[in-house]
Image (tube, rainbow, N blue to C red):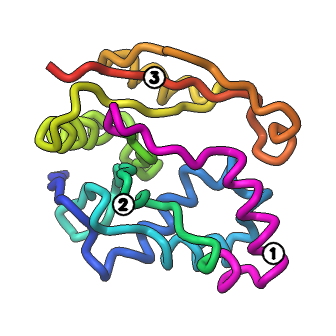
Amino acid sequence: MGVTIFRGLHPQLRPQAARLYWEAFGGKLGRVLGPDDRALQFFQRVIRGDLCFSAVGDGGELIGLAGYKTPAGSFAGGTWGDLTDVYGRLGGRWRGGILWALGHEVDNDRFLIDGICVGKAHRGKGIGSTLLAALYQEAAELGYGAVRLDVVQDNWRARALYERQGFQPVRTVELGALRFLFGFAASTTMVRPLK
């Protein structure tokens, strides 16, 4: 199967992108952004096609995504207004507060990756590495000297990929009481210098 990497996201692929992102991150975000139908509606609404790379198969299906964050916004962040439009005023407010507590920073010194996901049927085939290569090139073109990402403590498969790619852990943050909502206790920041 051939795979093509595109900068951006074709509008007709937004529903697939929302499903792929939720498949990858729903286990961590499900208690906050669920139920599934609302989460899919939210991500289809907020995903920024200008802040990602897409991996598309020969049949035109979306098989992978790699998003990033800049001072102008993030790939899958959205706004308080997006949250309240999808979850209602009260539901949007408490979700927004929890998500803000989880992470809202932008790293102006390093290129910040905001989520990589590859469909289950396509994992282990080098697609994640190819998406990372596209992100490295984007970071270099924007003048960054290093790339940064955060990986949850229990995601050993992703961490192993990042370590093979030259990422080094620089700090681990404990979630405290938020671990009960997100299902993981800590997140590790990893950095890879660009050559």
Which quadrant holds residue 106?
top left
The type of residue carrying mark 3 is Met
Q: Is residue 122 left or right of residue 18?
A: left
Which residue is at a point 81% across and 75% down the rendered structure image?
91
Q: Which residues are magenta?
A: 83-111
Spot occupied by residue 159 in the image (x, y as percentages of width and height): 49, 23
The number of numbered badges drawn on the structure is 3
Q: Is residue 144 left or right of residue 65?
A: left
Callout 2 secondary element: loop
For residue 125, which quarter of the picture?
Answer: top left
The mark closer to the camera, 2 or 3, is 2
State which tag comes first along the sequence, 1 or 3: 1
Label 3 packing within 10 angstroms: few (<14), some (14-19), many (20+) = many
What residue type is disc 1 on? Gly
The Cα atoms of the two marked residues, 2 and 3, are separated by: 22 Å
The residue at which mark 3 appears reads as 190
- In primary-sequence order, the first of circles 2 and 3 is 2
Q: For residue 91, which numbered disc appears in the image? A: 1
The mark that comes first in sequence, 1 or 2, is: 2
Judge by depth and name the residue closer to the eye, 194 or 158: 194
Q: Residue at x 41, y 14 (%)?
A: 168
User: Which quadrant is the C terminus positioned in?
Assistant: top left
Q: Which residue is mark 2?
A: 72
Instruction: Judge depth for marks 1 and 2 and give the one in front.
Output: 2
**Height in image: 187 above or below 74?**
above
Q: Is residue 6 above or below residue 116?
A: below
Q: Callout 1 environment at 10 Å: few (<14), some (14 to 19), or many (20+)?
A: some
At a point 35% along the width and 54% down the height, the residue shown is 65
Helix or strand or loop: what does disc 1 sit on?
helix
Q: How far across and how far down the image is residue 42, in percent?
A: 59, 75
Q: Quadrant of residue 116?
A: top left
